[in-house]
Structure formats: structure tokens, C-alpha cells
Image (spheres, helix red, strand yellow):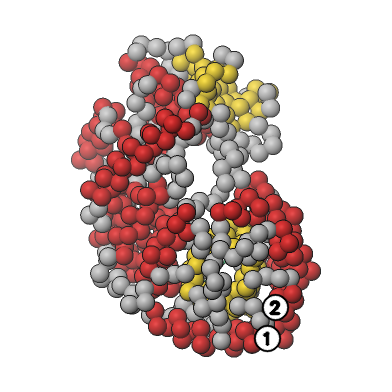
Amino acid sequence: MANSLGKMGFHNQIILAPMVRVGTLPMRLLALDYGANIVFVSSVDVLETVDFVAPDDRVMFRTCTKEKERVVFQMGTADPERALTVALLVENDVAAIDVNMGCPKEYSTKGGMGSALLSNPDKIEAILTTLVRGVSKPVTCKIRILPTMEETVSLVKRIEKTGVAAIAVHGRMKEERPRHPVHCDYIRAISESVSIPVVASGGSLDIIKTNDDIETFREETGASSVMLARAAMWNPSIFRSQGALSVDELQYIKELPQYSILCVCPQAVRYDNNTFNTKYCLCQMLRDRVESPMGKRLHAAQTNEEICEVFGMTDYYQMTQAELEARRWVLQATSSPGHQPAVDGDVITMAVRFERREYPPQITPKMYLLEWSRKEKLEQPVYETEQRAQDRAFQSTVTVAKKKYRSTLWCKSKKFAEQAAAIVCLRTLGVPEGLIREGNSSLVNKRKREERRHSASEDTGITDSTNRKRRVTEESQKEEQESSDKSMVVNGVPQP
Ligand SMILES: Cc1cc2nc3c(=O)[nH]c(=O)nc-3n(C[C@H](O)[C@H](O)[C@H](O)COP(=O)(O)O)c2cc1C
């Protein structure tokens, strides 16, 4: 078993705990910068492998070399073989593999995953043994405590025998909520009864207010290491040994969008961070300041650029965009044949996908294609969409000037499939498609003028974001009507 966590393994480490929605790549990089030694990727459920790998074969986990030696990949699973399949997919890109045995949410437990496993020790043993034997990286698990100390210690001893490298213990029972006090005595009893490292979790609310408190929590639980979830979500600089930065300094607030820009820009490794996820994390950090003028502007932001504006980082945003864009074109030109048009029968194809965040809120490639067709006095583009049975994914073909265009990548929604087809057409023709990085085009300017006219005449009782939503809806309705959405085909059978 290779140990890429270094000599310390899980001893004496300060760890960013797994947090769904929060523990994305930017937050993990931020935590590492501030001093976390290990970071967890939140639970990816592998009950159905198809949930893990998107219909277009995208793996639902993003990482980068910077965290490779220190990132632990957590999965939610109830099936040893599926768990192994997924672990083998990611093992070369991570430092360790963890199994989530603590999630009490119904979406997890109803499939026998998360805390449901705690009442099925045979299953726990089967999953962990299969993983320990099958993968080349350390395997760990994260549990909650059971109703009695005896039961908990007995379960943990059984887990230790599977060969796991460490065990993380959230010191609450599955029925207990995050506001309930953490049971340090249970974690201590576990730490004293096993020889593998124990990682204490659950101290954010009662104990960990400052960086020094991390050690206090470790001492109280007798654990080898400590893992922080909410304390890090509220202020990732809690990992700084010199002391956390205060919210008033706002210095750290500036860093998340910074990472987000890094992560949002298309490049070889395709880091990614969704605007809404970034907003969610920033709002968690602002806490009661979400009602401040800055919080309100953040709330209204629809793109990463707008988020950056809120923090006075427009110059940084533009500079990073330009740098990354240059890299993207070099990479595309040199390494990805899928981005060049190919011919499949009478259809021109390309492997492209519609990424909403790459376009201004009111703009889509379909709108650009429609506008261009009008200017060229061509007939309106005609979209035909097919849905395949195995995963219900969609693929569209658009006909423009009697030529057909299609993306080879299948999409989760019909709308996205049509946008992807429009992109293939526009890129093949060398026509702008409305990307933010293309800069303002006449269409974007036209939308802005319309928007300004609209705002001026609107009833002041309606908020900006309401206006925007309504305008976007109106635009998309118009667009939907304008596009001749001729037919839908499921398994080759046209649908009404
Ligand atoms: C937003 C959020 C998401 C979480 N997601 C996960 C998860 O995906 N997997 C997991 O094992 N625990 C998850 N947890 C639980 C934490 O890892 C941790 O055990 C718990 O919050 C107690 O630690 P704390 O007091 O430091 O917050 C999550 C907690 C929060 C607040």
C-alpha cells in the first residue's frame, strides 16, 4: 500500500473534513494554502456507477496536481464491487480513499449508504476489505458513534481488522444534529482502544473557535488528528498557525473567487467551479453579513465576473481570463482532435459541450445562431433531438443552410444538447457564439441596451434579480419559440 500522505500518514494532521457543496477544489486549495495538511473530497455516491460517471463520460470529481499527495477521495457506497471499480478509477489521482459511514441524510441511507452502514457491520467489513485488498492507496472510513460506548468500540475494533489506515469519528450519533454537543469521551474511548490513527470530527461548534483550539480538541479526544468542517466553512483561514484572519479584514474572502477564476477557466485539467457553488461558500463565510450591501451584491451576482466585481477584483479577473484563454487555445490547437470538426455521414461533428457559465446570463449560442442565420437571410436553424434509453441522455442535430451539425457528447438535458449542436455549427463556420471571453458583441450590447431600457421603465418595487430572471425567462421563451424544435426521437422512434 503506497502512502502518498508522507511519513506522517494520518498522525498529527489537521484536515479539511468532507463537506458536500463546500469541499470543492477551490476550497480545498484554499485550506491547503492556509495550512491544512490533508483535504477531503466530499462524498461521491457510487450506488449506481452511472451516477459517478456522467452520461458524457465526465468523471464527477475534479482535482489538480497541487493537492494530489494530500487529497482523500470520499465515496458513499453500499456495494463492495462498485466501490472498488470507482476507487480504481481515481486511485492514481488521490492520496487515499475514504468510505462515508456517517451521512444520516435519507438520500444516502435509503440506498444502504452513509450511516445506514453502521447497523450492517458485515457490509462494512466486505466494503473495506475489498478496497484494502484492491487499491494501492490507503483506505479509511468516517463513522458516527453508536448509542453506547461498548457498541462503538466493538465496531471500531472490527473496522481496524480490515486493514484500514485510519478511522475518522464524528462524535455524534446518527440521530443527533450538528447543534448537539460533541461526545469527546466516545472519541477518546475509541482512540484508546485501537492502534490505527483516529481522526476526531465534530468540534467546530463547541470547541474550535481559533487555531489553538484545534489542539485543545485533539487533546480532549486523545485522537491522532483533527478534522474541521464548519469552522473551515465559516473561515478557511482557521488553518493558519499564526491565527485566523478576521471577517473584517476580508482578505481571505478575496481568495475564494480568485481560486474560482482559476477553476472556472477552461484549461487542460479543466478545473471547475460553479458560480452558484462559489456564491454558496462565500455566503457561508459572510454569515450574518449576507444582509450587508456587499452581501446583497454578492447574492445578485450571476457570473464569476460579477462576483469578482463585488470584491473589487475585476482587473484580476480579466487578467486571469486572458492568460488562461491563451493557454486554452494553445492546448486545443495542439492536443484535442475532438475540438476539430469531423464528418460522420452527412453530419459535421465536434466534441463540445454547452457550459452555461461561459456565457453571459442572457446569451446562448442558439441565439447567436438564430441572429446569424437572419443576417445571412437563411432559414431558421432546425433542431432534432434524440434521447438514448440507457441513461436518458440527449443529442441534438441542427440543420443550417442544408448542412447538419452535432456534438458527439451526449447531454443531460434537451436544451443543453441543442446548445451544443449550435456551438458545433458556429465554430465550424467560424462565427462568434457569445462566449464571455469573446468580449462584448453587438448581440450582448443589444441585450444590455434592452436591459437598461427595461430597468428604467420598471416598477421600482421589483428587484434587479427578479428583473433579470424575468428577462432571461422571456428571452429563453422567445428563443424556444423561435427555434424550430421539430422533433424528439427516443430510441429512433419519433415522439409527439
Ligand atoms: C455543509 C456540510 C457538508 C457535509 N458533507 C459531508 C460529507 O459529504 N461527508 C461526510 O462524511 N461528512 C460530511 N459533513 C460532516 C462533516 O464532515 C463533519 O463530520 C461534521 O460537520 C462535524 O464536524 P464540525 O463540527 O467540524 O462541523 C458535512 C458537514 C457540513 C457542515
* Residue pointed to by mark 1: 193
What residue type is disc 2 on?
Val
- Residue sticking out furthest to the left: 456
Name the residue located 34 percent from the left edge and 31 percent from the top edge.
434
Mark-to-mark CA distance, 1 and 2: 8 Å
* Residue pointed to by mark 2: 156
Q: Quadrant of residue 120?
A: bottom right
Query: Percent x, y for residue 254?
Result: 29, 60
Query: Percent x, y for residue 30?
Result: 39, 62
Q: Element under label 1? A: helix
| Residue 84 or residue 449, whichever sits in front | 84
Name the residue located 68 percent from the left edge and 58 percent from the top edge.
135
- The answer to whether any part of residue 429 appears in the image is yes
Name the residue located 67 percent from the left edge and 82 percent from the top edge.
194
Name the residue located 28 percent from the left edge and 52 percent from the top edge.
308
Quadrant housing the C terminus: top right
Quadrant housing the N terminus: bottom right
